């Protein structure tokens, strides 16, 4: 059960980064929360339930935000503005390399005496979240990446912390909700100003702020404005 | 006692949040709210000064009111309450007092907590409250919504990374305490901890988000960053070191951290000369102070820790004072650019006095209490290496020069006619002046710090 859940976390997290339609991204995120809950059941059933409730709340917040933004901006229901096929390939390869890296790390350095699947799960989620943030093209992608990263961190904390730390463990469960809420507010504010949610617009308007953020440098991509580019690709 | 104090601040926070939710309520009931802030501060101070002090909190315990909390909480509360009292009377964002109260509550709980994970979570919580202020409020001089969103995203990402680093450092140090043969972990833990602390507190060279945040956030969110958040971050550093002295007893780790901290302070002092906005100048000034404190703690010496603790306590008041006055003078001139400020000393005499007191406290000039802290740091640095002492002194001279330039430019330089020539409002001005007087009084009577400092330092036998 534990191994199956850990293995299924690979497609669940990878799809969040690769899918173009925001609803499918959120479905994958829901699956991810469920699988992390299953992994946590082995460690601490009470916290696992809390995590699932918190995940469902974060998911609801992000769903409402996505619906609001995409109904206002009249864009096609795509999270990403980049659609060339090679980018799918690039992201899939990045995900595969990260998954293999996480598996090798879990095998070589079973830190904190945790079972292999648990070590693999937190390392994989952490790497996947970081990649999503680094490759993000808009605020929703940043939010999704941060939530995935926070979920991996949460898994590690719950698996290794002492039972006497329970108030902090419960407080940690609120982090995904807070992150989802704040990125949603940022996204909605940006879309209210009629600028969509792309980070490249922030680079135009606040260049010295974004350009000095070297550790979290966000790539600027050329915007494709042809009608074909706005329609979701088949199979995504 | 800890629960009562936290409850007191939490109650004030809830009242302020509720009041903020209703338009015009803050303006209508400002005298009642001021009374509430004074009652909360008075009650908390009375509890702190009359409660018995427990032994220094060890990790894994619950809440504890120890000597470190007794030393730092009164100035933290005073600075935050002063800023709240002033903000209630200023035409600023209505959420600002609530942001300051929430962050003070979280910092109080963190300083009283013996649970390391809870402290990390509370650090993140304060950062998220500041971020919420950044996203909700866009009425400031720098209130371009794009700038706020861009700064907010950067701040959020860096804080999540900081939390991850602090958690990893905590778990690895626990792992090391169970497996002391893994000696390679000491430097790894120190490196991860320093990155996490630097990002969370905004110390050099992990300062990427601090100047933009100072520029874009409403003034009391900036107060929350420079006051409660940075104070809690340093307290976490001190408690972590107290619980695991092995972290700094490696001489290589200690030397590298001291060099990094002093270089950071010097760099912040130099970079302050390139700033053209008052808020950004104050951001680099706050980073320079943090460099001094980091230097003192990394020295693992009694003199260094004494200096760092005094500076930390003093900056809990001086930083809110400087930030609030900066907001006040910028609002009066309608400009944030240093070149366009000026001629305010005659209009705002009490505010000018309070600003000067804040500047004296920030750079460690007598009669401010920080003079004794800087003296202690310089004493240690001179005995350790003369070059270190010279660099430390140089960073102080640079800071003094730049702040004197900015003070002259803001208050005394002749400038174009000011549109708003009304005299300063008595209540906020007297609050600021009293805070300034308090900074001077604590310096004239250094015994105020002496007894609690000796109590704190007694718990650290590993100090040289």
Image (tube, rainbow, N blue to C red):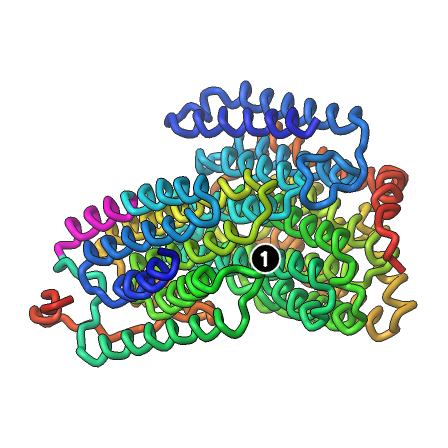
Tell me the quarter of the image containing the N terminus of chain A: bottom left
Q: Chain of mark 1?
A: B
Please give the name of the residue rendered at 52% of the width and 58% of the height, measured from the top-left corner.
Answer: B164
Image quadrant of residue A45? top left
Please tell me whether residue A72 belongs to the stretch shown in magenta.
yes
Whole-percent x, y for residue B295 in the image: 76, 63
Please give the name of the residue rendered at 38% of the width and 69% of the height, measured from the top-left corner.
Answer: A131
Above or below, B397 relative to A166:
below
Residue span colored magenta? A61-74
Identify the residue under disc 1: B166
Whole-percent x, y for residue B142 in the image: 44, 53
Tell me the quarter of the image containing the C terminus of chain A: bottom left
The residue sitting at the right extreme is B383
Above or below, B235 relative to A92:
above
Image quadrant of residue A111? bottom right
Left or right side of B22 for B162: right
Left or right side of B254 for B147: left
């Amino acid at each position: 059960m534990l191994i199956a859940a850990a293995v299924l976390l690979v497609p669940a997290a990878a799809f969040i980064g690769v899918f173009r339609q925001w609803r499918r991204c959120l479905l994958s995120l829901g699956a991810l929360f469920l699988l992390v809950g299953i992994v946590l059941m082995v460690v601490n059933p009470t916290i696992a339930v809390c995590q699932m409730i918190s995940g469902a709340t974060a998911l609801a917040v992000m769903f409402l935000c996505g619906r609001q933004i995409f109904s206002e901006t009249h864009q096609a229901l795509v999270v990403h503005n980049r659609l060339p096929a090679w980018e799918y390939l690039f992201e899939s390869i990045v995900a595969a390399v990260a998954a293999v890296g996480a598996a090798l790390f879990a095998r070589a350095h079973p830190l904190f005496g945790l079972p292999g699947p648990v070590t693999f799960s937190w390392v994989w989620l952490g790497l996947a979240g970081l990649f999503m943030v680094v490759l993000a093209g808009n605020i929703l992608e940043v939010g999704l990446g941060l939530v995935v990263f926070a979920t991996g961190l949460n898994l590690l904390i719950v698996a290794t912390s002492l039972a006497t730390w329970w108030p902090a463990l419960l407080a940690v469960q609120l982090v995904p909700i807070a992150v989802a809420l704040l990125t949603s507010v940022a996204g909605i504010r940006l879309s209210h100003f009629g600028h969509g949610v792309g980070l490249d617009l922030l680079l135009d308007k606040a260049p010295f702020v974004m350009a000095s953020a070297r550790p979290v440098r966000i790539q600027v991509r050329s915007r494709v404005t042809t009608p074909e580019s706005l329609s979701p690709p088949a199979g995504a | 006692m800890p629960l009562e104090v936290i409850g007191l601040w939490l109650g004030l926070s809830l009242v302020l949040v509720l009041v903020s939710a209703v338009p015009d309520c803050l303006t209508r009931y400002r005298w009642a709210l001021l009374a509430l802030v004074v009652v909360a501060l008075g009650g908390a101070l009375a509890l702190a000064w009359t409660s018995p002090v427990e032994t220094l909190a060890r990790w894994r315990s619950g809440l504890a009111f120890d000597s470190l909390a007794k030393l730092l909480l009164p100035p933290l509360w005073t600075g935050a309450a002063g800023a709240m009292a002033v903000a209630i009377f200023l035409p600023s964002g209505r959420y600002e007092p609530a942001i300051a109260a929430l962050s003070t509550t979280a910092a109080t709980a963190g300083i009283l907590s013996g649970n390391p994970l809870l402290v990390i979570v509370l650090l993140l919580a304060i950062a998220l409250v500041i971020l919420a202020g950044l996203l909700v409020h866009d009425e400031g001089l720098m209130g371009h919504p794009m700038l706020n969103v861009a700064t907010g995203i950067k701040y959020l990402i860096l804080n999540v990374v900081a939390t991850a680093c602090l958690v990893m450092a905590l778990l690895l140090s626990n792992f090391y305490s169970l497996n002391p043969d893994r000696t390679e972990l000491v430097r790894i833990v120190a490196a991860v901890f320093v990155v996490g602390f630097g990002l969370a507190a905004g110390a050099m060279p992990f300062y990427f988000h601090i100047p933009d945040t100072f520029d874009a956030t409403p003034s009391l969110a900036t107060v929350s960053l420079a006051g409660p958040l940075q104070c809690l971050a340093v307290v976490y550093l001190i408690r972590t070191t107290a619980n695991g002295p092995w972290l700094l007893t490696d001489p290589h780790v200690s030397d590298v951290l001291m060099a990094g901290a002093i270089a950071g302070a010097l760099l912040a002092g130099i970079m302050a000369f390139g700033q053209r906005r008052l808020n950004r100048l104050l951001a680099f000034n706050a980073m320079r102070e943090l460099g001094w404190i980091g230097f003192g703690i990394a020295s693992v010496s009694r003199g260094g820790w004494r200096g760092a603790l005094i500076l930390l306590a003093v900056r809990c008041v001086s930083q809110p004072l400087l930030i609030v006055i900066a907001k006040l003078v910028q609002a009066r001139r309608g400009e944030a650019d240093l070149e366009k400020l000026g001629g305010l000393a005659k209009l705002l005499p009490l505010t000018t006095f309070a600003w000067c007191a804040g500047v004296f406290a920030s750079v460690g000039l007598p009669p401010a209490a920080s003079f004794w802290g800087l003296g202690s740091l310089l004493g240690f640095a001179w005995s350790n290496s003369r070059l270190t002492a010279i660099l430390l002194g140089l960073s102080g001279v640079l800071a003094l020069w730049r702040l004197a330039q900015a003070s002259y430019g803001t208050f005394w330089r002749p400038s174009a006619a000011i549109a708003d020539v009304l005299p300063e409002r008595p209540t906020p001005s007297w609050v600021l002046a009293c805070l300034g007087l308090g900074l001077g009084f604590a310096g004239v009577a250094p015994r105020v710090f002496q007894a609690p400092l000796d109590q704190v330092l007694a718990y650290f036998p590993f100090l040289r």
